[in-house]
Image (cartoon, grey):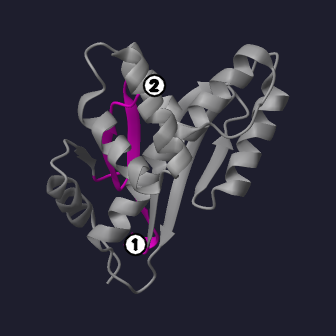
Amino acid sequence: MATTLNAIAQRLENKQWQYEIDRQSQTVITGVRTSSIPQLLIFIRLKENGEYVQFLAPQLCHLKDNLFKGVAYQTLLHISYSEPLIRFATDPNDGEICASVELPLEDANLTQRQFDRCLDELIHLIDLETMPRLNRVLATGEDTGKVNPIEYLYQAAMGDRVGVSFDFRRSAEMLLTRATPEDLAWLMGQIQQRR
């Protein structure tokens, strides 16, 4: 059973995403625009004859010569600890940081729901948690903890007059289903101030 490159391609077509297939490396390459990374590349790689799927986002940043790389590594470890799906890795040669979500299928088929969850979680955890915290750490040397995703999305949308379009809407829809009454009250207050 497991899955194939064609099945991955079909899952992306169901989402109306563009992609390229590299059969030699057993990888489907796609990408998305986020509020924190203009072009987030995503490699969906099959391993172990399609029984293991890796969703990989390379080149989030490079920490090799950064003064605050120790705090940055601690921040990434903390995010991995508190968000069970995401893992981070670094290339010791150039300090490249990448993130991944991995799914062992073994003898099961990959469902659209599993695929969507892995892909969406990778994107949202990078965009709404990892990069805002990591950018703050790299600028100040301090990790002030978890970012309020409602506030972050609002600030991102207000800073981009064209709008973050589809990605913002999708992120906002996902977050609003998880928003607390306090988050919604804060958001409404911000909107009222803009009028």
The circle drawn on residue 49 is 1
Foreground pick, 24 / 161: 161
Residue drawn at 15 percent across, 48 percent down: 16
Vertical position of residue 36 compared to residue 12: above or below:
above
Q: How many marks?
A: 2
Foreground pick, 34 / 183: 183
Q: Amino acid at mark 2?
A: Gln
Q: Amino acid at mark 1?
A: Asn
Image location (x, y in percent) of residue 41: 39, 35
Image location (x, y in percent) of residue 155: 47, 22
Residue drawn at 52 percent across, 39 percent down: 149
Image location (x, y in percent) of residue 46: 40, 62
Q: Quadrant of the N terminus?
A: bottom left
The circle drawn on residue 190 is 2
> In the image, is 100 to the left or to the right of 194?
right
Disc 1: CA contacts within 10 A as few (<14), some (14-19) or many (>=20): few
> In the image, is 53 to the left or to the right of 71?
left
Q: Quadrant of the C terminus?
A: top left
Residue range in magenta is 23-51
Image location (x, y in percent) of residue 160: 35, 15
Q: Earlier in the sequence, mark 1 or mark 2?
A: 1
Residue drawn at 19 percent across, 53 percent down: 15
